[in-house]
Amino acid sequence: MSLKLDVSFNLDLSLCCGQVFRCKKQDDWWYCISGDKVFKIRQLSGSCLEFEGVNADFVAAFFGLRDDLLEIEQSINKDAYIAAALKQFKGLRLIRQDPWECLASFICATYKNIAAIEQTLVKMSQSFGEKQCFDGQSFWLFPSAEKLAMASVHALEECGLGYRAKYVQATAKRVYDEQVDFELFKRLSYVEAKKRLSEFSGVGLKVADCVLLFSLGKMEAFPVDVWVKRILLNNYANCLPQDLVERLQGHKSLSNGEYEKLCLFAQNYFGSYAGYAQEYMYHYERSRK
């Protein structure tokens, strides 16, 4: 199947900027796993997407093609730093991931680099997920909450989760036992959805913001990690309270209060699309290293 694009979109940028972990490029095709779907997709000459395994509605939703990227760019283009990021990565869009997979994945991702996260998720999926054959290859769907709830902590540790194993198991058990409907979170306010997500085991403020931004459509969410903290200190220190800047320059970790102050600054500065600004700046900063 194919989809002619009438909006700005760059498939490669959107899939290699650190927001998804289960998409891999082989030759000129991207192979992706999301929820109960395995599919492949490629971009032809910038104006057309070709794909197999899913329909056009799924592609439009998954890749955020209905987001008004022109309005978003105009809204967040506040200074020279973000302007440079927008120019370099034109067409980068936020992916709409499966909420359960996104939640469990970012619990696994705490204090891990992207390569290690990807390896852990592969091991988990091969150990507890359902195998599917597609395009002559074997893929494993992400494990259901029920499967991970019944897994032993030791078995999860064997997948490379380490201390995160108990958090993944506890959250999976709660999601399964309470039959959590993540679609309901989309209808909550950002503040209320973040509060409820933070009640799950292993979910701190940053993980909650990642889930809100990358799967639940809360585009004001602004995840702050070491990269984003560095960006804010190096480029926006004059906009932040001086005492906060001095504290942040003196230590690596963020207290919850410090995190929330940085998040609130970004939301006030960039507005309702602060999450888009975060992803552009995050990828821009990493690309310069």
Image (cartoon, rainbow, N blue to C red):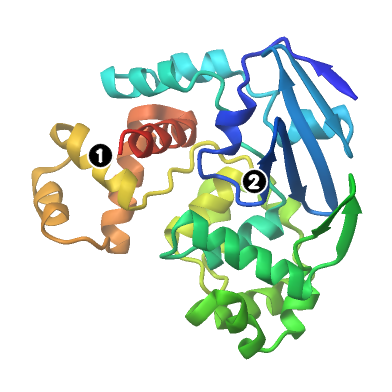
Helix, strand or loop at label 2? It is: loop
Q: Residue at x 71, y 11 (%)?
A: 47
Query: Who is closer to the viewer here, 123 or 148?
Result: 123
Q: Is residue 104 visible?
A: no
104 on left or right of 228:
right
Callout 1 amino acid:
Leu
Mark 2 → mark 1, Cα distance in angstroms: 25 Å
Q: Quadrant of residue 143?
A: bottom right
Res 203 label: none
Q: Are marks 2 and 1 in contact (CB under 8 Å)?
A: no
Placement of 76 over or under 283, stated as above or below:
above
98 on left or right of 162:
right
Placement of 96 over or under 143, stated as above or below:
above
Q: Residues within 10 Å of mark 1 (few under 14, many from 20)?
A: some
Callout 2 amino acid:
Leu
Query: Who is closer to the viewer here, 6 or 132?
Result: 132
Q: Residues within 10 Å of mark 2 (few under 14, many from 20)?
A: many
Percent position (x, y) of residue 112? 44, 63
Query: Who is closer to the viewer here, 118 or 82?
Result: 118
Q: Which residue is mark 2?
A: 216
Percent position (x, y) of residue 75? 44, 18
Q: Is residue 18 visible?
A: yes
Pointer 2 or 1: first along the chain: 2
Percent position (x, y) of residue 178? 76, 74
Query: Who is closer to the viewer here, 139 or 281?
Result: 139
Placement of 194 over or under 16, stated as above or below:
below
Work out which quarter of the rendered image holds the N terminus and state it.
Answer: top right
Q: Residue at x 38, y 18 (%)?
A: 77
Work out which quarter of the rendered image holds the C terminus and state it.
Answer: top left
Give the foreground label among 2 and 1.
1
Q: Which residue is mark 1?
A: 232
Helix, strand or loop at label 1? It is: helix
